[in-house]
Image: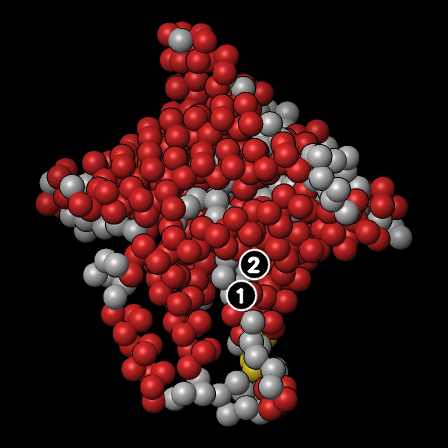
Amino acid sequence: MLEHIELFFRSIFIDNMVFAVFLGMCSYLAVSKKVATAVGLGAAVIFVLAVTVPLNWLLDQYILRDGALAWLGPEYADYNLSFLSFIMFIATIATMVQLVEIVVEKFSPALYNSLGIFLPLIAVNCAILGGSLFMQSREIETLGLALNYGVSSGIGWFLAILAIAAIREKIRYSNVPAPLRGLGITFIITGLMGIGFQSFGGMLTGGDEAAPAPEETTVKAEDEKEKKKKEEIDEKAVSYNDVINK
Amino acid sequence: MALLSKKDTNLILDPLADNNPITIQVLGICSALAITAELQASLVMALSVIFVLGVGNVVISLMRNIIPSKIRIIVQLVVIATLVIIVDQVLKAFAYELSKTLSVFVGLIITNCIIMGRFEAFALGNNVWRSFLDGIGNALGYGVILIIVGFFRELLGSGTLFGIKVLGDPVTKTGLYATGYENNGFMIIPPAALIVVGIIIWVQRSKNRTLIEEN
């Protein structure tokens, strides 16, 4: 249970899809002019991530990874198909998006009208493929955690696009320097929000995983006082990258 | 020029500045930002995209008359994914460390909007040679921004270029560091990339005021 909670908050705040790893930026920038459309796209992303991440987890676990084919029989045990994962993941995503579109259109026309136009866009949203690839590279252990990861990173993306859309609606009334209008200021605001979101990284140091890294830093820093400042910054960046790579 | 007519030259030159995929068309931002903390990674990413987009545009352009339009998205995705797998395997074989740094972002070239965007907007309706030039041009426009961002982030953030200490040694205080200069750790963290791109957009639009958007 604890690991579910940790993963949930980590995917929403610390490893936020938009602010920490820059996934789904294209639609994030293009569809964030109005709050209403941003909410529609955000909901569609949560939905598709929640479907595709667990599905790709199964695919990875039982077909793609090293030795995954062992359930077919001992002679298949040393097959490693992981080089096929890009093409398998993207095929799953494209077909699932299509399927979801058909099902939603049939059973809930109201939902289709609000999500409909965004669903085809989502097939090529980096956040969706990114979710599956990070799920693979972080070696998420169970199907439940994979579902959790899909939903929570979707929520993180939703929060991000909702926030920027709200800010952009307000900023229309401000006096932005002409060359920065539109795209430029959106980039800079996103950067500043990203820096804000970095402070959630402090949530991790309470856990046992990230604790050893800062300890090492202080020992080193005592030895070499001159290097202290730079070392800490580097160490932070390194441990942060480690977290991302996990 | 016999090889490149004026129209063809524009196909390559336009995306470099006035129709840049990142700063004007807003495509392919996703992978552009995360890997630009070092110049070397930016360069490799740029080369990978040049390869994928150049070859991909040619393949799609060759098949443009036989792809049924209903399933074109999935055909395009398969072509891109195949090319990206080639890039990924080559990187893993010859530059393993680098492929670790780029991690999932090589895979994310698949959903790089530039590639789908150029397939849809250009390769499906133009002949092979023009599609090839368009692909190379747009990938170069993408690469230029990547390299500019990578250059400033690595130079200001760690005082190095391609891992070579160009500003002197921060520990023994040689070179620029002797005068009290410090590295800006801020440039290493991911959000700095967004701010650098924002500034590039600012500079570009101040130079060419026709690009300014309405508020």
Residue at 16% from the left image edge and 41% from the top image edge:
A1
Could one spot residue B190 in this view of the protein? Answer: yes
Category of crowding for the residue at label 1, using alpha-carbon neighbours closer than 10 angstroms: few (below 14), some (14–19), many (at least 20):
some
2 and 1 marks on the same chain: yes
Work out whether residue A59 or residue B67 is closer to the camera in this orientation and state it: A59
Q: Position of residue B209 (x, y in %)?
A: 85, 46
Residue type, numbered disc 2: Ala
Disc 1: which residue: B186
Q: Are marks 2 and 1 in contact (CB under 8 Å)?
A: yes
Q: Residue at x 46, y 78 (%)?
A: A230
User: What residue is drawn where x is 51% and y is 37%?
Assistant: A163
User: Visible in this render: residue B19?
Assistant: no
x%, y% of residue B134?
A: 72, 43
Kind of residue at badge 1: Phe
Is residue A224 found left or right of B8 in the rendered image?
A: left
Q: Is residue B95 above or below residue A155?
A: below
Residue A228 image point, x, y percent: 42, 81
The quadrant the C terminus of chain B occupies is top right
Query: Which quarter of the picture shows residue B62?
Result: top right
Q: Which residue is mark 2?
A: B192
Viewer-proximal residue, B143 or B161?
A: B161
Number of marks in picture? 2
Above or below, A45 against A67 in this view is above
Q: Nearer the viewer, residue A35 or A90?
A: A35
Label 1: state its secondary structure: helix
